[in-house]
Image: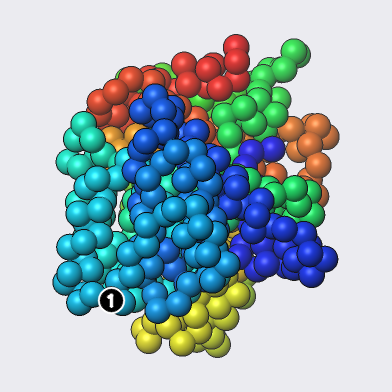
Amino acid sequence: MGLRTYTAEHITQTEKPHLDAGVPLMDRASHGLGETASRLLAERTGTSFGKHALLLVGKGNNGGDTLYAGAYLRSEGMKVTAVLLADGCHDEGLESFTRSGGHVLRVSDMSESDAVRSVVDESDRADLIIDGILGTGGRGGLRSPARDVVAAVGARHGTSEARNRDRKPLVIACDVPSGLDATTGQVHGPVLPADVTVTFIGAKTGLVATPRRSLVGRIVVLDLGIGEDLPAADAEVMQNSDFPSVWPMPREGDQKYSRGVLGTVVGSDDFPGAGLMCLRAAINAGVGMVRYTGGDFLAGTVAVACPEAVRTEAVGVDRVQAWAIGSGATGSVREHDIRAALDSGLPLVADAAAIDILARDAADDSRSGPHVVMTPHAGELEQALEWFSRLNSKGAEPLRQAAEDAGWPREEFPEEGYPSRETIESSPLVWARAAQTVLGGTILLKGPTTVVAGPGRTWVHSGNSFWLATAGSGDTLTGILGAGIAAYAARVENGQADPADHDAWARVTAAGLLVQRAMSRVAPGPVPPTVAAERIPQALGNLAGR
């Protein structure tokens, strides 16, 4: 189901016995890279024959793959220049490349400024650029002169203005764009934006988890004949085709209680809009019934804007199967209602103020179960993790260990005892997983790349319209997720779903993100929450295929 991704260590351990047995994995990788590059260039320009390729070559096996691929491109009638960006390189690959008639440019033979100028000039003549500097095992960013060369070529061809020019080279990354961590997706220094990343054995988690997904382009996986030996996935990308099997769709014989009743503690007299956006999204996402709590002013606005919603006197008075809480729910009365919903033990979607309450609970050693879905953006997660670290009896150590386990170097853990918003945004996969470890629950960390971290499995999501970056989009998402969680909770209650499937809540949450993406792309242009909510039924129908 969907795209499965793997860590650098997964790939290393998978290929090791095959390499030890003499399986020619480099031959397969380089041939596949060259063949794919030639085909993609021909699709773009009509032919690869007579075209010019520029190879940016590092000293490791990634550079060797690229040199062998360059020899293949020479056999296809292309003019190929290899820029050797390090003092050494893969000797056999270089020999094969020079035998094929390829041209070699060594930056070690030039001053740094001359090297940058020469490579930029070569890039202007190139129809194809292959980035083969750092591979899966690369750590940290590029070092000079490679750093300066990539920065200059990227400035020349990687900007949006350059991409709109008539003649822009096709950029292919070999295995992973150089400077992007293959496991976490963190970006270190300048990275040459790729149109396509050709990756070997299995897709690397960092390719989908990076907060700068545009650096990766389209992902092409060449499994080299050993993909079946990969372990369980590190993370997954849910596809639209997965939606009908994951989202709890209506069935013959359903009524409002079997479709799920969602209770809400959202909005307040001070912030009624957040509540209205959440309620409208939940209703339009097809939940069986929506109940809401709140004062008379909120009730009056709901009666006009969302007449389908049913008022309940207080949390616990009427039957619900799940809760959506926190969005716009400010003040002591609403905090009391949030606490009552949390204490109900029912599945729920927690946003905004509710996340802080859960973080304080976790600091008191009361971690949430997986049926509690928290939906912070980076700023809210910073605040929640600060609460945890300051109030926990062990201080920041549990979070420090969780971050290290998730891939953050221990020596780089923030001195403050919790990550800043910027740190979280730089590596959302790491911090979503660390948060899930210390806070419990299911963590949906919102951002350009959104991560859903459950107790056992992780999903990564991207591709939403950039127009969703508006106030209220999170409230709309809370409503969508609330509808899905309530419907799934009804399945569990009715014996139609396994209560021991703890990652099911994360799975449904990831499917809810497909709804958000689909409704954001129904038409081009801005997607304010009122428009977004109107699009939800169409988006759901398209995803469900009915």
Q: Quadrant of the C terminus?
A: top right
Q: Residue at x 38, y 20 (%)?
A: 522
Q: Secondary structure at mark 1?
A: helix
Q: Residue at x 26, y 51 (%)?
A: 123
Q: Which image quadrant for residue 179?
A: bottom left
Q: Is residue 38 left or right of residue 546?
A: left
Q: Which image quadrant for residue 361?
A: bottom right
State the colouring used for the structure image: rainbow
Q: Residue at x 51, y 25 (%)?
A: 285
Indicate the position of residue 390 as horizontal and vertical percent values. Answer: 43, 81
| Residue 364 seen in render | no
- Rendered view: 56 above or below 228: below
Indicate the position of residue 257 as horizontal and vertical percent values. Answer: 67, 25
Front one among 451 and 22: 22
Q: Is residue 233 left or right of residue 335?
A: right
Front one among 277 and 526: 526
| Residue 42 seen in render | yes
Q: Residue at x 28, y 35 (%)?
A: 467
Residue at mark 1: 109
Q: Quadrant of the N terminus?
A: top right
Marker count (numbered): 1
Indicate the position of residue 278 as horizontal and vertical percent values. Answer: 41, 35
